[in-house]
Image: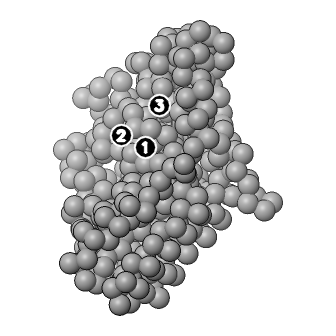
Amino acid sequence: MARPFNFSAGPAAMPSEVLQQAADEMLDWHGSGMSVMEMSHRGKEFGEIMESAQGDLRELLAIPENFHILFMQGGGLAENAIVPLNLSRGGPVDFVVTGSWSQKSIKEAARYAKATLAASNANSNHTTLPAPGSWQLSADAHYVHICSNETIHGIEFHELPDLKALGSNAPLVIDFSSHVASRTVDWSRVGLAFGGAQKNLGPAGLTLVVVRDDLLGHALPACPSAFDYKTVAANGSMYNTPPTFSIYMAGLTFQWLKRQTEGALSGVAAMEQRNIAKASLLYDFIDDSALYVNKVALDCRSRMNVPFFLRDEALNDAFLAGAKAAGLLQLKGHKSVGGMRASIYNAMPLEGVQALVNYMRDFEKTRA
């Protein structure tokens, strides 16, 4: 029997091949006699897992050698504190607020630094992106923070801002939790990127931080040692016990990503083309529909998180019940915005989006 299609925003669907491999290796990893969950993080076996995961991720995302890959804990919410504790030096930091997650980020950073609002899309109810040329950047900001994909509101920066072109020498910090590994990254424009793994990389518990060399060593005295990027980097993400099983699962996902192809493309480049096709299929159907609507501006619609609304919201419960019966799960929108949301991360195949569109079309016909 085919598995249902899971459109959860996170923790999210994982590739079936990855889940099956983990199941096959659950009791005995590569003849070691141990499950990965039972291994010492200091042992040779887990050392191989860690080294492979970091190497594969560096290759997949084309991360330059002057950036450290840190495997941490606490999720994106914890990084909202850990980043200013490491980079702000207690001084000014700029934020571009484009939805719920960047709102949380500026609020948390204000506990440790002078957090300044450089731009906001609140006047459009988070349905547009403020043009970088309109941002009011501080001359002495220690970094500029954006959430490059807003999971709840379905907003995505399809091109990262060039801060130097805007007259700023501050490093750009991106929260790329919900679209990491779905597209390539221009690292020349980034100082630090962070994200929880539970949307596109693996299960909850692992937090990825990619940080440039020159940004290490500036942590505030109050920063816990386990969250000091310099300490974490110096200890190979092993200063404290890392989330070993989540790292293992992410590593299997990285290997799965490396195997993906789309024409002559492979890895993340292949996934980007596949994600464009999936998103276009769903958005095109919604835009042509008389029942469904997406309110986000065309130039900044997320490829990963597609919020939509039924014009007659009295039909919401019937829509969700029918979707569940059809094997289409977790389509209810976030409680703060309502409506529906289809999260179509890397692990969601094109067939899943086609099944959703077919269901939405049939549902609309029965209500015409």
Determine which quarter of the picture holds residue 308.
bottom left
Image-based side of 113 in relation to 248, left or right: left
> In terms of sequence position, does the residue under pointer 3 or pointer 2 come before the other?
2
**Observer-nearest of 182 and 113:** 182
Report the residue marked by disc 1: 198
* Figure label count: 3
Image-based side of 285 in relation to 77, left or right: right
What type is the residue that disc 1 sits on?
Answer: Gln
Task: Reply above or below: 298 against 27.
Answer: below
Tag 1 secondary structure:
loop
Distance CA(mark 2)–CA(mark 1): 9 Å
CB atoms of marks 2 and 1 within 8 Å: yes
Nearest-to-viewer mark from 2 and 1: 1
Report the residue marked by disc 2: 75
Report the residue marked by disc 3: 246
What type is the residue that disc 3 sits on?
Answer: Ser
Nearest-to-viewer mark from 3 and 2: 3
Query: Residue 69 in the image: x percent, y percent?
Result: 54, 35
Q: Check the image and name the residue furthest to the right.
A: 264
Query: Residue 84 in the image: x percent, y percent?
Result: 31, 43
Mark 1, Cα crowd under 10 Å, few <14 / some 14-19 / many 20+, is many
> In terms of sequence position, does the residue under pointer 1 or pointer 3 come before the other?
1
Residue 343 in view of the camera = no
Residue 61 in view of the camera = yes
Tag 2 secondary structure:
helix
